[in-house]
Amino acid sequence: MAAPARIVATLLVSTFAFGTAHALAQGDPNDRLGLGTKLGIQMMNQSAQVGSVTLFHRGARTFVDVSVQGVPAGKVERVAIHRNRDCDQPIDPVAAFALTDLHAGRSRTLVNAGSAKLLSGNYSVIVASVEKSHHLFACGHLYR
């Protein structure tokens, strides 16, 4: 193999290896199969914020990974799981489970509730303003 071809092959292998390691780092390391329950998050109040919430079963607990696009740069937003049966219905103002604040569109939290409970259809993930908690940006209903 000529020297330029070897360099290209080495770069391709290095790029693939780095890309694979990076992709594996995206999953929750405690999830044996790398699978979770992924659901959509819809925009509320014309915020243009949409995304997903993925729940990973951890026995009596659940790892909750929230990813939201459309969050203004540098903006921190509040994320929590609230009781409600649908994103179009009134939301209980008191959070059932607090999640870490959304930084750069991401929140990752281990919640002290099983995934079966969270996916019972009685809860939603709500993204709201830190300054005005009643101003809602996005909602993702949790169900199986």
Image (cartoon, helix red, strand yellow):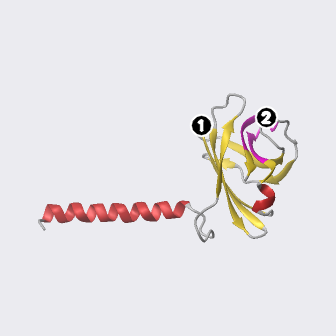
Q: What's the residue type where badge 1 is placed?
A: Gly
Whether residue 131 is in magenta: the answer is yes
Near-viewer residue (11 or 35): 35
2 and 1 marks in contact (CB < 8 Å): no
Say which residue appears at 76% left-offset and 36% top-offset: 136
Q: Quadrant of residue 132?
A: top right
27 left or right of 120 in image: left
Q: Quadrant of residue 28?
A: bottom right
Q: Quadrant of residue 36?
A: bottom right
Q: What's the residue type where badge 2 is placed?
A: Asp
Q: Residue furthest left?
A: 2
Badge 1: few (under 14), some or many (20 or more) residues near its Cα, within 10 Å? some
**Residue picked out by circle 1:** 70
Whether residue 75 is in magenta: the answer is no
Identify the mark nearer the N-term, 2 or 1: 1
Say which residue appears at 73% left-offset and 63% top-offset: 62
Say which residue appears at 11% left-offset and 65% top-offset: 2
Q: In the image, is residue 67 above or below residue 55?
A: above
Q: Which residues are magenta?
A: 124-140
Say what secondary structure mark 1 lies in.
loop
Horizontal and vertical percent position of residue 74:
61, 41
The circle drawn on residue 58 is none
Horizontal and vertical percent position of residue 85:
83, 43
Q: Distance from label 2 to label 1 (Cα)?
A: 21 Å
Near-viewer residue (7 or 38): 38
* Magenta residues, dominant SS class: strand
123 left or right of 39 in image: right
Badge 2: few (under 14), some or many (20 or more) residues near its Cα, within 10 Å? few
